[in-house]
Image (spheres, helix red, strand yellow):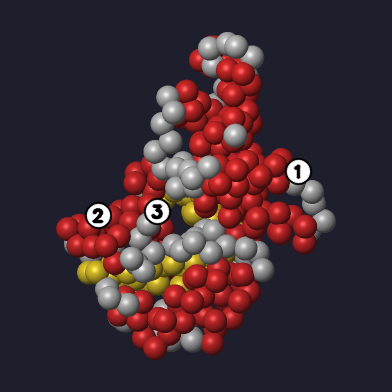
Amino acid sequence: MTQIAMLGTGIMGAAMARNLLKNGHGVAAWNRTRERAEPLAADGAAVAGSPAEAVAGADVVMTMLNDGDTALAVMAEAAPALRDGQVWAQMGTVGVDDVPRLAAFAAEHGATFVDSPVQGTKQPAEQGTLMVLAAGPQDARTVLGPVFDAIGSRTVWLDEDGAGGAGTRLKLAAVSYAISLTSVIAESIALTKGLGLDPALLGEVLTGGPLDNAYLQIKMKAMLADDFTTSFAVRNAEKNTRLIHDAAASAGVRVDVNDAAGDRFRRVIEQGHGDEDMAATYRASFG
């Protein structure tokens, strides 16, 4: 059994914590809004009142927080209870420029930093089938192996040095695909409707052909049903478009589709639907 501090128990963090518990690990859960962590007590987690309380005695600290600044601020609150030898698995999506700052903080406090964002949304998190994109030293891999196996179906180790941000860089490239594809699906369905046709006809054209895929079917079904139950929120997707833009700009790469997707998400947020699933980018075609 590994004792884990789970800092951040939103949609993803809570699901990950439950799978850790199911696999026999100990979890101390903390969330800024305590009410979002408290349901985990029924699954066997200890609900902590502060980040420091959560990390005290933990072998592994996992952060599943909104952005790099938040992760750094929360770890600063945890700092009085950090000890040499703890492994910090940073699993949220942050910017490329955030990773060296986070790694430096870990080094200052004697923790081993592992850059390990996850690929996947609510359903894979609940099923324990996330993909972990990780970079960190061999000794940390030994500790994290059974932990990552509890939350994911596969771990891709990319580099020995978490500070290099290989996991974050690959995550941003992968999430740019999902974000852009969601917007493409939304525009195609909206255009079908706008041209006076039943948008379900688009599904008849695409299903079973070379352009079909499981992601198309999931998002198309949601858009056709106006069911935007959150798997990955518009707000988070919009934030990621900015991280992708900044990473691409630093590499001299243009990401025009990503940037257009960001504009769509911002329109949806202005319409008051920022907490819905990113499939709600469909709404941006009509407002």
First in sequence: mark 1 or mark 3? 3
Q: Are marks 1 and 3 in contact (CB under 8 Å)?
A: no
Please name the residue that numbered disc 3 is placed on: 12
Q: Nearer the viewer, mark 1 or mark 2?
A: 1
C-alpha gap between disc 2 and disc 3? 16 Å
Say which amino acid is labelled 2. Answer: Lys
Crowding at dot 2, Cα within 10 Å, few <14 / some 14-19 / many 20+, comes out as some
Q: Position of residue 172 (x, y in %)?
A: 62, 53
Considering only vertical position in the picture, is 279 above or below 126? above
First in sequence: mark 2 or mark 3? 3
Q: Which mark is residue 22?
A: 2
Left of 132 or right of it: where is 103?
right
Closest to the observer, 161 or 225? 225
Left of 100 or right of it: where is 155?
left
Name the secondary structure under disc 1.
helix
Query: Is there any visible trace of residue 49 in the rendered image?
Result: yes
Query: Is there any visible trace of residue 234 in the rendered image?
Result: no
Q: Nearer the viewer, mark 2 or mark 3?
A: 3
Say which amino acid is labelled 3. Answer: Met
Say which amino acid is labelled 1. Answer: Asp
Considering only vertical position in the picture, is 275 above or below 17? above
Please tell me which residue is depicted at 56% across the width and 46% down the height of the picture.
270
Name the secondary structure under disc 2.
helix
Please name the residue that numbered disc 1 is placed on: 256
Please tell me which residue is depicted at 80% across the width and 52% down the height of the picture.
253
Closest to the observer, 44 or 218? 218
Quadrant in which residue 222 is drawn: top left
Q: Position of residue 207 (x, y in %)?
A: 54, 16
First in sequence: mark 1 or mark 2? 2
Please tell me which residue is depicted at 48% across the width and 43% down the height of the picture.
273
